[in-house]
Image (spheres, rainbow, N blue to C red):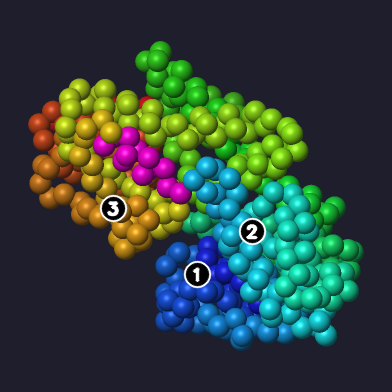
Amino acid sequence: MKIVVVGLGYVGLPLAVQLAKHFECLGLDSNAARIAELKAGHDRTGEVDAAALAACGLILTSDAQDCRGADLYIVTVPTPIDADNRPDLSPVRSATRTVAALLDPAKTPTIVYESTVYPGVTEDICGPMIEQLSGLTRGADFFLGYSPERINPGDREHTVDKIVKVLAGENDEITELLATVYGKVTSGGVFRAKSIRAAEAAKVIENAQRDINIAFINEVTKIFSALDISVWDVLDAARTKWNFLPFEPGLVGGHCIGVDPYYLSHRAQELGIDPQVVLSGRAINDGMAQWMADGVHKALGKDGADILILGLTFKENVPDLRNSKVIDLVQALRAHGHRVAVHDPHADPAEAQHEYGLDLAPLPTAADYDCVIGAVRHDPIKALGAAQLAAMLRPDGLVADLKRMWAPLAGDGAASVRYWSI
């Protein structure tokens, strides 16, 4: 069996590496620079190391013509939202156009989508596109399937070779084909969803559920703040109950949790349903950066401060900058009249400049700032001690700890800095 994985990002590359251990597998990415890096053994996402890349036998290419006549095409491209929070299916459409031009009806190929979408996209949008572009007939010349990705960037426990893989084909034969292929990839086994739509829906609610749970914690954080109660102290107590869910407050960004609920709400609105809970959760989480900036501004007690934010990526210990809500914090603080610099030990400086127009700052070696904000719980940031933080700050400087990384400062009477947290 010849397999092509279309898109070699956080999702596609780890999957392609595992597939290449068992099948003839090609990894296709339109970004030639990405392919060159991977051939040199460097994965900028940090998900696959050079040894694994070299050993797996994966064929890497940016030329779609190398991928003609495969038995199975797996599409793993991003599904972002636009400026109005509407689904942007252009990457999926582009990948579909690419695949449609490569199909050999003699192989009766199967096209599987892993990209997160709302129910119906695979069969109602992608299938008809392939038919129109290729002149082939679905169900005779080619078949469709869906297997939602479950990659968690930076997570070395729940990797693609260990998790349960949900899958569905458009008929029982295709479902079993996918079960055979994915069954070789993961030790976690496979789950045969009732339909492609059910599999699409399962993926989109997994992330919407997390978004809503975090929104609840963010909302109670605001309530407790008004009562002069630290939400972290409340969570310490609540977590002693065996069935309390351990969600934390924070900025909710990234390419999944901060995006996927909008796919679900979009489809609901098309059906005439008002998704109140889903959109309420999104509104709360999208507003947290402004609320945090207001709190820092009040704690500072002055205008025109020099502020250093530590952390820019959307989560800890990964280089992924997509849809980072730290940029909202930067903008809100600047709107208050402060001067803001950002340092991140994991982020790519060129990507930060390209995505957000930010020139990443080095860790200061002198007392250059009035405030240091801990925004992302990267290990090197979390490891900073009281003396190091104090050395960055001018007299009466403020440490704003959004992730409770430096909690001992709160009770350290000897510390020469002021400490504030949510």
Residue highlighted by disc 2: 115
Mark 3 lies on a secondary structure that is loop
Q: Please report the residue visible at 70 percent of the width from the left and 43 percent of the height from the top.
A: 267
Residue 223: x and y, percent? 46, 18
Contact? badges 2 and 1 (CB < 8 Å): no
Residue 180: x and y, percent? 79, 71
Q: Is residue 289 left or right of residue 30?
A: left
Residue highlighted by disc 3: 358
Which mark, by number, is residue 48? 1
Residue 338: quarter of image: top left
Instruction: Of the two numbered discs 3 and 2 on the same chain, state the one appearing first in sequence.
Output: 2
- Between the residue at mark 3 and the residue at mark 2, the CA separation in whole angstroms equals 29 Å
User: Camera-side residue: 115 or 407?
Assistant: 115
Above or below, 286 relative to 139: above
What span is in magenta? 323-334
Q: Is residue 284 left or right of residue 205?
A: left
Q: Please report the residue visible at 48 percent of the width from the left and 74 percent of the height from the top.
A: 31
Above or below, 381 relative to 289: below
Instruction: Of the two numbered discs 3 and 1 on the same chain, state the one appearing first in sequence.
Output: 1
Query: Which numbered mark, 3 or 1, is in the foreground of this view?
Result: 3
Mark 1 lies on a secondary structure that is loop
Label 1: how many residues lie within 10 Å, few (<14), some (14-19) or many (20+)?
A: some
Label 2: how many residues lie within 10 Å, few (<14), some (14-19) or many (20+)?
A: many
Query: Which numbered mark, 2 or 1, is in the foreground of this view?
Result: 2
- Asked whether residue 248 is drawn in magenta, I would say no
Q: Amino acid at mark 2?
A: Ser
